[in-house]
Image (cartoon, rainbow, N blue to C red):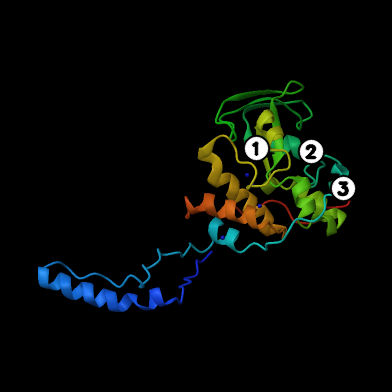
Amino acid sequence: MTPPHAVRDRRPSSPRYRALPILTLALTGTLALTGCGQVGNPLKSTPAPDSRVESGSALQAAEGLAVKRPASKDGYERKAFGSAWIDTDRNGCGTRDDILAAQLDAVSRDPDGCKVLKGVLDPDPYTGTRIAFERGRSKVDIDHLVALSDAWQKGAQKWSDGKRRAFANDPLNLVAADSSANRRKGDGDTSTWLPPNESYHCTYVAGQVAVKKKYELWVTRAEQKAMTEVLAGCPGEELPTGGNPTEAPTR
């Protein structure tokens, strides 16, 4: 297989601050006489660390996402994104089975060639544990990196039906993961939920950024801040690409 700030220097203009240069000169002269090094001007700003980010990185993309307040959740229904796990890529198999087959190990299928009957998720990206998959008794969910409800509140309610179907079935937005962790996530974004497995945070957030960029969804200010804080720890993390077209066929 697949979702930023400068600090201004505000200096008070009170007489106390205007007098500092005189005090600095006096101190410098005194210290020079005693053999000590010079004292720097306390009003001179310390050079900021290099804030440049790599071109094409997930961090750069996160900083470029549109920031708005979320729209109302009113009107959201799962069926607004089409029937679950339809065959949008027309390969003869539903999306859920496509993702299971791609992301599990030791996969065994039904004779129909589509239904995944067994497999192993090792490791589960959300918890870092090994999970055995067995159809009908599964502890593995297919999670939308960017939840459908979150997308609805950040642009999707104005999309065409075809675009919503594409979004719900795009491999770029789908990951096989522990069902309990997925359900704790709910429709949270990066500012409200991250996987327990910290080693997956950069990959997880980069995936959300990629989805939001691809589908032109916006983020909240808190969400963007959380994204950039995670990705600042891995500034070289590449932005995932690929997946399906952003408009799904009618049937």
Q: Is residue 154 left or right of residue 75?
A: left
Q: What residue lies at 67% left-to-right and 53% top-to-bottom? A: 211
Q: Residue 176, how many percent across, how many down?
A: 66, 35
State which tag comes first along the sequence, 3 or 2. Answer: 3
Q: Quadrant of residue 180?
A: top right
Q: Is residue 35 left or right of residue 15?
A: left
Q: What residue lies at 30% left-to-right and 73% top-to-bottom? A: 41
Amino acid type assigned to the residue bearing label 3 in the image: Ala
Q: Residue 141, how many percent across, how many down?
A: 71, 32
State which tag comes first along the sequence, 2 or 1. Answer: 2
- Tell which tag, 3 or 2, sits nearer the viewer: 3
State whether residue 162 is above or below residue 144.
below
Instruction: Report the front residue among 78 and 75.
Output: 75
Q: Secondary structure at mark 2?
A: loop
Instruction: Report the front residue among 174 and 219.
Output: 219
Query: Does the image show residue 217?
Result: yes
Q: Residue 189, how many percent across, how many down?
A: 67, 47
Q: Quadrant of residue 108?
A: top right
Which mark, by number, is residue 80? 3
- On the rendered image, what quadrant is the N terminus found in? top right
State whether residue 76 is above or below residue 217.
above
State whether residue 245 is above or below residue 44.
above
Q: Is residue 94 left or right of residue 143?
A: right
Which mark, by number, is residue 145? none
Q: CA distance from mark 3 to mark 2?
A: 18 Å
Amino acid type assigned to the residue bearing label 1 in the image: Ala
Amino acid type assigned to the residue bearing label 2 in the image: Gly
Q: Secondary structure at mark 1?
A: helix
**Disc 1 target residue:** 102
Instruction: Report the front residue among 37 and 248.
Output: 37
**Disc 2 target residue:** 94
